[in-house]
Amino acid sequence: MATPRVIGLSPVTFASEDPATLGQEYQIPLSALKFDAHGALDASDWPPIKDSKLKPKDVTLVPLLLADLLKRGVLSASST
């Protein structure tokens, strides 16, 4: 069975909460997101996370943000 694509209206945008980069804006393209085996959104293939360039506080923030967007229906799985 194919993994569903993540669909939404725009990239996921957030501002850094880490003191070293406070306020810096990031955008995660929907194409960099995938669903894990438990149905949670996973951004581990997004280059700033994959290459360990995102600050620790923001690495913690991203899964919480993605879970909230999924719960509210802003992001969802494709039906095909």
Image: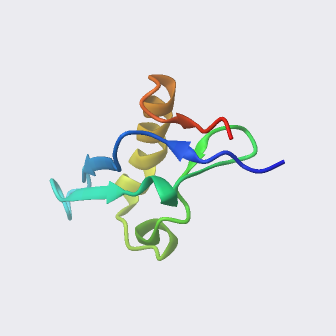
Q: Quadrant of the C terminus?
A: top right
> Vertically, is 57 above or below 20?
above
On the picture, is 8 further left or further right than 50?
left
Residue pictured at 36% horizontal, 54% vertical: 58
In the image, farthest residue toward the top:
72
> Vertically, is 27 above or below 7?
below
Residue pictured at 50% horizontal, 60% vertical: 32
Please state which of residues 7 and 28 is positioned toward the viewer in this rendering.
7
On the picture, is 60 further left or further right than 55?
right
Residue pictured at 68% horizontal, 37% vertical: 39
- Residue 76 on image: x %, y %: 54, 34
- Residue 65 on image: x %, y %: 41, 39
Please state which of residues 55 and 33 is positioned toward the viewer in this rendering.
33
In the image, farthest residue toward the left:
23
Please state which of residues 51 and 79 is positioned toward the viewer in this rendering.
79
In the image, farthest residue toward the front:
80
- Residue 70 on image: x %, y %: 50, 31
According to the image, what is the colour scheme of the structure?
A: rainbow
Residue pictured at 84% horizontal, 48% vertical: 1
